[in-house]
Amino acid sequence: PLINYSQGTYRLKAGNKSFDFGNDFYYADAPPRLDFTSDEIVFAGYGITDSLSGWNDYNGIDVKGKTVLILEGEPMNKKGYSLISKTKSPSVWVSNRSTKINLAKKMQAAAILIMVNDYIGNFDRYNRRMEYGRLEVDNEANAKVIPVIYVNKTAVTFILNAAGKDLAVFEKNAGKHKGKNGMV
C-alpha cells in the first residue's frame, strides 16, 4: 500500500488566534489527516547537536512528547562563518532540512515548529510539492509521522508573546548554546 502526502486542511491556532495556511504557516510531509494539540512548546535554538563542533541546542532540555520550536539556519559569527562548520559554507544542518527534523524525532518531540527566515520564498518552493503531493510506501516508519510546521516570524512572535516571552531574547540566546533554551 501507498500513502499520499498531499495538501489537506490544516489549522494552526495559538490562544485565541488562528493563523492562515500559506500566509502564516505551511507543513511538509504530513498525512492528509492529522489531529494534534500541544500545550507545551520547548525552544531548542537552531535544533542542532553536533559532536564535531561541540554545539548542542538540546543540552539540558527535554522535548519528549512536546512541540519543539527551532530556528531555521545555523549560528554564525559576526564575520559570516558558521559556528558549526567553521567556514562560510553552510553545514549539513542547513543544506539538508531533514537532519534537524530527524534529530527532533530522535529526541521524541511530538511536533516540530520551524521559524523560517524567508517565509515567502520557502513557501513558493514547497507549494507545488504540497499541491501535487508525493507517494511513499506505507510502512511502520511512516506510521510515526509527526507534524513539521514551518511558520513565519509574525506567527512565532505572537505565540511567544502569548506565553509572556520575547522572540528577540530567544534569538539572541540561540547563538550561545549554553542551556539558555527551554520552555516557552
Image (cartoon, helix red, strand yellow):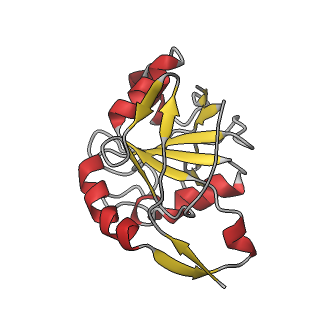
- The residue that appears at 48% across and 35% down in the rendered structure is 174
In the visual, does 150 lie left or right of 118? right
Q: Is residue 109 left or right of residue 176?
A: right
Above or below: residue 40 compared with residue 127: above
Q: Residue at x 48, y 39 (%)?
A: 12
Give above or below for 95 relative to 50: below
Quarter of the image where one finds residue 36: top right
Q: Residue at x 44, y 32 (%)?
A: 18
Residue 75, image quadrant: top left
Q: Is residue 52 visible?
A: no
Residue 41 image offset from top left, x and y in percent: 61, 33
Q: Nearer the viewer, residue 170 or 11?
A: 11
User: How many tags in the picture?
Assistant: 0
Of all residues shown, which one is farthest toward the top? Answer: 164
Residue 77 in the image, given as x and y percentages of width and height: 34, 41
Above or below, comparing residue 124 to residue 41 in the picture: below
Is the N terminus in the top left, top right, bottom left or bottom right quadrant?
A: bottom right
- The image shows residue 17 at horizontal and vertical percentages of 44, 26
* Quarter in which the C terminus is drawn: top right
